[in-house]
Image (spheres, rainbow, N blue to C red):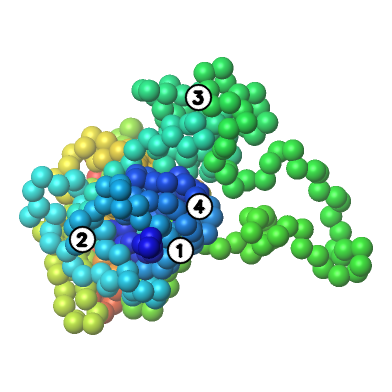
Amino acid sequence: MSQTKTFFLPDLGEGLPDATIVEWFVKPGDVIKLDAPLVSMETAKAVVEVPSPVSGKVLKLAGGAGDVIVTGTMLAEFEIDPSMPQRAEGQDTGHHHGGGHAAPAPAKAEPAPAPAAETKRDDAGTVVGAMQSSDAVHTEAAVAVGGVKAMPAVRAMARKLGVDIARVRATGADGVVTMDDVKRAAADGSAKPGAPAPRAAAAPVGATQVATGVAPTSAPATSPRTQLSATGKPMRTQPPSVSVTGQPEQLKGVRRNMARVMADAHSKVVPTTLSDDADIHAWAQGNDVTVRLIRAICVAAKTVPAMNAWFDGEKLVRTLHPQVDIGIAVDTDDGLFVPALRNADVLDANGVRQGINRLRAQVEDRSIPASELSGYTISLSNFGMFAGRYATPVVVPPCVAIVAAGRARHQITPVIGGFESHKVIPLSVTFDHRACTGGEAARFLRAMLDDLALSN
């Protein structure tokens, strides 16, 4: 009698209750080997490749591309082939598999050891501070699907940019499509659905292609807009499964996690915001605004350690940090990322700028490790690069403070003998009033204003 195996979606090492299917590497009826790529799943920060737990025939798959699967529920079902290699009973796979159909409750964020105490480990740094750090390593490999070799993250980027990855000219080793190949194709429009396939394409035009999740360009033009349908009733223009403006859209990945984190923060923190303007009239030419803001935060954190802290609201325990790890809010189309700039208090201006550029590049191509997205001690939102003057930024536990910088402007400032036009940066500091006093927050803001007033 053949033996079947139900594979439940494992905890992918980020403490999230679900993940979104990006693409299956198999279909029902296929035979797969142990540890061969089974599916790529999108979590709140990356596309993670999940290997097969057995060798055998695929009987059933849970959902299709874009479906959200709850951690601990059925992901796939197999008929085990005893003649093929199998994992020994009880052998650790590096994932924790749920045994039932109920999703486990997400773990509560506990203060982690200071990064300085860790050795030989990448900088620890989560989407808005909600995910747990993990030592589990997820390796992404270039997998051939439909005759195209590409890493899961590259395929995800192709879908996002509306690029038919089967038509992208590969420049990577062994014919692998790289992130740069996809971005180049998106820029020049050479890989749109319906475009001629590149000469060096590894697969014929008729090969199976990855679903892009966007409407084909050959779709018929929509009719002129009217308030009512021909029957006089409001009508749906697309089925619910199609993401179209005006249609319900299920939040996924980063944006889904952001919604959870913001709701959690709102229910736990007692926020209070102080605002003031930093006069930067004395700045020498060439000052980097973000770098100066980070330096000012570091100076203020040393002056008022209570603002560079974590707070456990259930145990009423406060942890002051000797180092300053700043979470840098990065806005993307997929949602909000907050990578951590580690040990910002010991970096010079050049080191801060290089660190910011590295984190932004990793966020953009979704290659940033989960460890870089958690454990920061205070955060910065430089929303003024877009618009806005003051804000009430959200403090995400266990942090107790966040700094927000608005759009710089000129204002008339009284000086001895008359008035001058000075450039100022609006600052807003939100703090958790359970852990910090108003005086501490005000002294923190004063220290920032004083440092930003310096010429260099």
Horizontal side of 165 relative to 172 (left or right) equals right
The reply to whether discs 4 and 1 touch (Cβ–Cβ < 8 Å) is no
Q: Which mark is residue 89?
A: 2
Task: Tell which tag, 3 or 1, sits nearer the viewer.
Answer: 3
Q: CA distance from mark 4 to mark 1?
A: 18 Å
Question: On residue 28, which mark appears?
Answer: 4
Say left or right for 328 vs 241.
left
Q: Is residue 440 above or below residue 35?
A: below
Residues at circles 2 and 1 in contact by the CB criterion of under 8 Å = no
Front tag of 2 and 1? 2
* Mark 3 → mark 4, Cα distance in angstroms: 25 Å
Q: Quadrant of residue 311?
A: bottom left
Q: Which residue is mark 1?
A: 69
Asked if labels 2 and 4 touch by Cβ distance under 8 angstroms, the answer is no
Where is residue 284 drawn, in percent x and y? 30, 35
| Residue 390 locus on image (x, y percent) | 44, 61
Left or right of 59 on screen, residue 245: right
**Which quadrant would the N terminus be assigned to in this image?**
bottom left
Q: On the image, numbered disc 3 is attached to which residue?
A: 202
Nearest to the observer: residue 334 or residue 437: 334
Residue 274, percent from left and from top: 35, 68
- Type of the residue with mark 4: Pro
Determine the CA span between mark 3 and mark 1.
32 Å
Mark 2 / mark 3, whichever is N-terminal: 2
Which comes before the other along the chain, label 3 or label 1? 1
Amino acid type at image mark 1? Ile
* Amino acid type for the residue under numbered disc 2: Glu
Whether residue 47 is visible to the viewer of this picture, yes or no, is no
* Callout 3 crowding tier (Cα within 10 Å): few <14, some 14–19, many ≥20: many
Q: Residues within 10 Å of mark 1 (few under 14, many from 20)?
A: many
